[in-house]
Image (tube, rainbow, N blue to C red):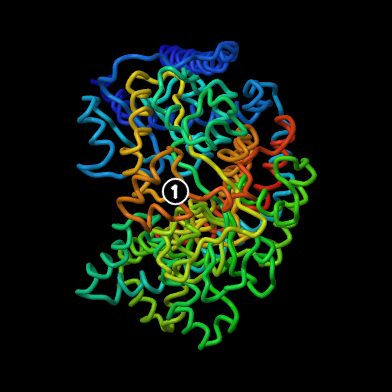
Amino acid sequence: MTLRRRFIPYALLTPGALWLIIFFLIPMYFMGEMALRSGALETGGFTFTWEWSNFSEALDGRGEQIVRTFFYTGTATVLALLIAYPLAYAIALKAGRWKLLLLFAVIAPFFTTYLIRTIAWKTILADPSPVVDLLKTLQVVPEDGRVLATGGDVIAGLTYNFMPFMILPIYASLERIDLSLIEAAKDLYASAREAFLRVTLPLTAPGIVAGVLLTFIPAFGDYVNAALLGGTNQAMIGNKIQSLYLVERDYPEAAALSFLMMAAVLITVLIYIRLAGTEAFMGDEDEED
Amino acid sequence: MSEKLRLRALLTALAVLAGALALAACGGDAGDDDEEEVQVAEAGPAQGKLVISNWPGYIDTGPNGSVAEFEEKTGVDVDYIEDVNDNAQFFGKLQPQLQNGESGDRSIFVVTDWMAKQMYDLGYVQEINRDDVATVFENLAPQFQTSNLDPDRKYSIPWQSGMTGIWVDTSKAPDIRTVNDLFDPKYKGQVTMLTEMRDTVPLVMKADGIDPTEASKEDWLAAIDKIKEAADSGQIRRFTGNDYTEDLTSGNAVASIGWSGDAYLIGNKNAEWRMPTEGCMLWTDNMVIPVGAPNTGAALEWMNFTYEPNVQADIAAFVNYVTPVAGVQEILRKRDPALGNNQLIFPSEDFTANCTAQVNPPGETEDVQEVTEAFEDVVSG
């Protein structure tokens, strides 16, 4: 009996653990091994030689692209948060009977594939298009300017494509809020603004943290938006890895660059969680228990 | 205690598993010695199943299409897949399999000259015995009998050929006639170039009077520098694959380096393919038989079949690129004179007089790698 009970957690863990081992750890091992190889495909393939210089080569001359990737992804994440929060707030707390319909509207674009959605933007934002004409009239875009093939539309594409990953977790955390807490705050003479800042916002912090991570991490490695919506000198690091792997066929350097970018994302996320996650936000949640 | 033991057993098992995988991986790479002996595609009866990988829109389809006709004629069950979108990506996808001598059940790929050559050099494609494809060599048009990269046609059989030049929106940029006009500041941000290095860079060199077949590595790098400057200044809007057709359609681009057979992909009636005054680049997409191809007998028969002028006429009429089969023009002239006299499908010798067949950058592997890297740094800059 006790033996069985002891066994159950392991049994429950097994599928997930196996999945991680087969599709994450083992590929990681091969990627790491590839990152330390040298040679060329054309001259007999790559051999394992502890070639650590692949890592420095991977970064060599890529500073601009790495900074650009952080900038695009960071901006897109902030924009997504600024757009998603009010929207999620409205859906969760103000939408009434429209709630389901609005939620559906958030997810509906996902019934179309990612690629098609992105390509659709090319049609909408083409140089001679009503949308761009309007933006020019509103002086958002200069008279001789354009929207497509600029850094701005890559950011817009990232923001749009990852938006639901921001909206849904924030919505879920807003939905769970006990409204009487806000009432209580107001009874204690909190203004609406104060009630929001000191009650609602901290209570939805876990949703924000999850949303930011779910947006930032996949957007960082994205290459579709930059490839389809970007112009020259707007490539992200994902595009570079793709070109290293498929065109230049420098598998070791591609693997090394992938590793470094993974590390960069991991460090960014850790710093972020440390700053935003556990202390500032989660701490408040604990106190309130 | 027993818990600890169990953990240790688990760890040992994992270590053994990892070790085995590492060994398997090394084993896969150690096959380098076998590459030396070149395989020759084995002839045999045309029967069974045949898997062909080709580019999208590269054959007449449907119940009356050439594939169906071949199936009916020979009884071979053809699985015709259109999964080649880009030479480099297709290669990237299949390289690990090819390295192990497997073709993923495919018996024929269609890839461009330089890729065919690269696959051959790596031992990924088989040689083809001339006698087994007699119909091919009987009907292969004279200008296709040899190629820069496969002079004796040992392994590559032309599928379709084409020209790389300039697509121009004549209503917006009527005066663009040479590749150098693409660098005119008047058209800043409205021209596109191809991500295919072997098209874009030689065209830029030709515009500056350099013959790509004799160009040095420095010439290639200088041309890439020129392209880089134009990319940095915003002169070039973007580097594209086939999607330049979309930029021409929606009016984002007024001129694009592009391929001669893409008219049906461009929904802009003002778009016109122009032969640059300095000449075009000529390329050929070739059928190759990969290593490990099953049913090479049926593959060879398919090659023969598509070289029958009547069959090829159907393909050419649908595809609108340059056909490598002699005698097709006469057939199409009777069927549809507009098609039969189209210079883009049947270019005369005068028309292509200044054109150059596609070449690789000169030098050793490292030199080619250096040029490729320089170009990729511009394209994904």
Amino acid on which disc 1 is placed? Tyr
Hey, which quadrant is residue B277 in on the image?
A: bottom right
Identify whether A186 is placed above or below A217: below
Nearest the viewer among B14 and A156 is A156
Q: Seen in the image, is A176 located left or right of residue B133?
A: left
Nearest the viewer among B362 and B17 is B362
Mark 1 sits on what residue?
B321
Task: Please name the residue shown 67% across and 50% down the image.
Answer: B201
Task: Please name the residue shown 49% across and 17% down the image.
Answer: B21
Counting from the top left corner in percent of width and height, residue A270 is at 57, 49
Task: Please name the residue shown 58% across and 61% down the image.
Answer: B192
Identify whether B305 is placed above or below B377: above
Quarter of the figure with the N terminus of chain B: top left
Query: Outermost residue, right direction?
Result: B218
Counting from the top left corner in percent of width and height, residue A56 is at 73, 39
Whether residue B295 is visible, yes or no, is yes
Nearest the viewer among A86 and B166 is B166
Whether residue B7 is visible, yes or no, is no
Q: Seen in the image, is B9 located left or right of residue B145?
A: left
Parent chain of label 1: B
Identify whether B353 is placed above or below A256: below
